[in-house]
Image: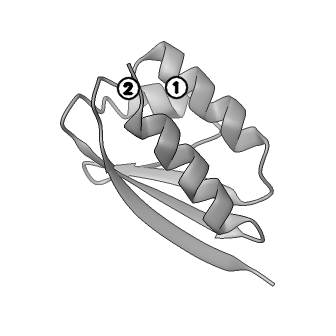
């Protein structure tokens, strides 16, 4: 069974190396494929270079999309990391 979950987060801070690293480490712990959408670009959340390359800044809306067996849990976990980025 495959599930799909999507949520949008307003970033409290720029998406730089530290939160990108936390995000990719968390993404690696899920079976689902997790993607981030920002400004017309989509990247795999498991790629630290992809996440940093989005260039998302404080106040930006980033959409988290997960597809797979643990999609709901994955999307929520990644959204939480984005929502608390410093």
27 w.r.t. 31: above or below? above
1 and 2 marks in contact (CB < 8 Å): yes
From mark 1 to mark 2, how far is it between C-alphas? 6 Å
The residue drawn where x is 58% and y is 33% is 23
Locate the N terminus by quadrant: bottom right
Q: Does the rendering let one see residue 70?
A: yes
Colouring of the image: one colour
Q: Residue furthest bottom?
A: 1
Image position, residue 48 (x, y; %) = 58, 27
At a point 41% along the width and 18% down the height, the residue shown is: 16
**Residue 61 coordinates in the image, percent (x, y):** 25, 48
Q: In this view of the protein, can residue 44 be seen by the observer?
A: no
Vertical order, 6 against 47 (above or below)? below
Q: Secondary structure at mark 1?
A: helix
Image quarter (top left, top right, bottom left or bottom right) of the C terminus = top left
User: Front-most of 17 and 26?
Assistant: 26
Please state the horizontal and vertical placement of residue 9, each as a whole percent of the image: 34, 49
Residue that appears at 78% across and 71% down: 69
Pointer 1 or 2: first along the chain = 2
- 57 relative position to 73: left or right: left
**In this figure, what is the number of numbered marks?**
2
Where residue 15 is drawn, which disc sits there?
2
The quadrant where residue 8 appears: bottom left
Image coords of residue 72 (percent x, y): 62, 67
Residue at the extreme left of the image, as rendered:
59
Query: To which residue does mark 1 refer?
Result: 20
Q: Is residue 61 left or right of residue 85?
A: left
């Amino acid at each position: 069974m495959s599930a799909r979950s999507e949520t949008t987060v307003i970033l409290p801070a720029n998406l730089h190396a530290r939160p990108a690293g936390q995000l990719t480490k968390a993404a690696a712990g899920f079976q689902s494929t997790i993607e981030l959408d920002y400004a017309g670009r989509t990247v795999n959340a498991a790629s630290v270079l992809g996440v940093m390359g989005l260039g998302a800044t404080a106040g930006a809306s980033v959409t988290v999309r997960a597809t797979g067996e643990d999609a709901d849990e994955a999307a929520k976990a990644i959204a939480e990391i984005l929502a608390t980025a410093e």
